[in-house]
Amino acid sequence: MAVGQRPRRGGERARMNRPLLNRRLAGAGTTIFAEMSALAVATGSINLGQGFPDNEGPDDVRAKAADALMHGSNQYPPMLGLPELRRAGPRSYDGLCPFHEERTPSFSVNPTDKLFYCFGCHQKGDMIRFVQEIQGLDFVGAVEWLAESVNP
């Protein structure tokens, strides 16, 4: 019986635990998770396809994973309205501008000086100005928002 097909006889029906949820997907085969799990078993690899592995794994892999978590960019996208920034040099980060729609990054942040500038729409300022624009706050509200985000 092919994956996703409904069984036709009583014996086969008894072995199937759940009904077919979507007939359009009946011929799609297995999921990427099933494929990667089988591949991990066949090659003796660590299976991260569905989250954490079944064991702790090799120390060197764990050390590299911990380093990536502590010093790398986050694997999750930023909150709506906040730019995802990537290192663009020793003193700046670039990303898509949150103030206008664009396909290529023109928004630059200098964390040392705590300044931002968009080469596309020419918005610029410091972190208080950024919070004012993004959150729609006045100066005092932006300062309070920043203080709350540092010390909730």
Image (cartoon, rainbow, N blue to C red):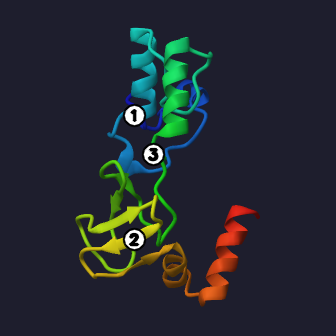
Q: Looking at the picture, does residue 9 appear above or below residue 83?
A: above
Residue type marked 3: Ser
- The residue located at (39%, 10%) in the rendering is 43
Q: CA distance from mark 2 to mark 1?
A: 41 Å
Q: Nearer the viewer, mark 1 or mark 3?
A: 3
Kindly indicate the quadrant of the structure image that contains residue 10.
top right
Residue occupied by mark 1: 32
Q: Position of residue 120 (x, y in %)?
A: 24, 77
Q: Looking at the picture, does residue 38 appear above or below residue 72?
A: above
Q: Is residue 46 left or right of residue 107?
A: right
Kindly indicate the quadrant of the structure image that contains residue 30.
top left
Q: Do the CB atoms of the residues marked 2 and 3 lie less than 8 Å apart?
A: no
Q: Is residue 33 left or right of residue 101?
A: right
User: What SS does tag 1 mark?
Assistant: helix
Q: Is residue 93 left or right of residue 17?
A: left
- The residue located at (25%, 74%) in the rendering is 119
Q: CA distance from mark 1 to mark 3?
A: 25 Å
Residue type marked 2: Phe
- The residue located at (50%, 38%) in the rendering is 71
Residue occupied by mark 3: 73
- The quadrant of the rendering that contains the C terminus is bottom right
Please indicate, yes or no, whether residue 45 appears anywhere in the rendered image: yes
Please indicate, yes or no, whether residue 9 appears anywhere in the rendered image: no
Q: Position of residue 42 (x, y in %)?
A: 40, 10
Of residue 87 and residue 79, the one placed in the foreground of this image is 87
Q: Position of residue 25 (x, y in %)?
A: 37, 46
Residue occupied by mark 2: 116
Q: Residues within 10 Å of mark 2 (few under 14, many from 20)?
A: many
Kindly indicate the quadrant of the structure image that contains residue 36.
top left
- The residue located at (57%, 24%) in the rendering is 11
